[in-house]
Amino acid sequence: MTDAEWAVVRPLLPVPAWLRGQGGQPEAYCHRVMLDAIRYLVGNGIKWRAMPGDFPSWDRVYAFFRRWRDHGLVKEFHDRLRGRVRETLGRDAAPTAGVIDSQPVKADAVVGADSRGFDGGKLINGRKRHVVVDTLGLLLGVMVTAADTGDRIAAQILLGQVAGVHHRLELVWADGGYTGSLVEYGLATLALVLVIVKRSDDMRGFVVLPKRWIVERFFAHLMRTRRPVRDFERRTASAEAMVYWPMTLLMTRRLARPHPGRG
């Protein structure tokens, strides 16, 4: 992490309880060192035990990762960065529209049978990431399931979670896999308008579809970091955290640019 990134990150970090006078033992390592270690692991796709000697021992870094995962601190940190990026680009911090899609990913042998499945459409044995992003391609919510879980079933849960956090969200674009009762459910229960963007039958080859390209670009950004290319996590909570961490890396780099509104 560069000094410019750290200057952006430091005020947005969750404040430990011992700094707020609520008890607890002070942490032994600087947050910047721990963040750098996790960013290195996510970006280069290494094992926890292969953590370089320049960082704290792997078990201390994993304990930091686990604590942030279990207490929702990584999501809190991510959401603060997303709000800052949106405000820097002249948008309101609270989004009003989003795009939903899913991505099946192969699972490593450590993934148990209770959280893995076979996606017959993509012929992938593993898990599936269901995500909602805003119109800038920034993550609003993620849920990891077995790969054989239907998109509409997972979307019903995920949209409920996202709508419960982002109260101004009122419009969501989706592909043809989300047609059916989900459209009526979103309008009647969640007060969300679900717009289906379909690919017409006369299209040939690669065609950029309106709004759907935004979530596809999100998956492309995610795949540029090596750890999420394959699911190596035993728990789905860890797999979801491994989606938030690459996005924090992307957003800190954007905020540290001299002119973040360009490019």
Image (cartoon, grey):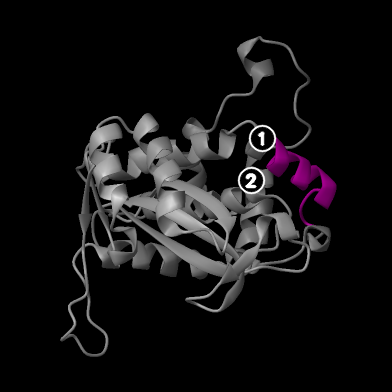
Front-most of residues 184 and 76: 184
Residue name at image x 28 percent, y 68 percent? 213
Q: Secondary structure at mark 2?
A: helix
Q: Which residue is mark 2?
A: 237
Cβ–Cβ below 8 Å for labels 1 and 2?
yes
- The residue that mark 1 highlights is 70
Q: x%, y% of residue 74? A: 56, 40
Give neighbour class at mark 2: few <14, some 14-19, many 20+ (Cα, 10 Å): some
Residue at left 39%, top 31%?
A: 165
Can residue 2 be seen from the camera position used here?
no
Q: Amino acid at mark 2?
A: Ala
Which label's residue is closer to the chain start, 1 or 2?
Answer: 1
Answer whether residue 28 is visible to the viewer in this image: yes
Left or right: 58 with respect to 216? right
**Quarter of the image with the C terminus in it:** bottom left
Horizontal side of 164 relative to 183 (left or right) equals right
- What span is colored magenta in the figure? 54-67
Three-letter amino acid code at disc 1?
A: Asp
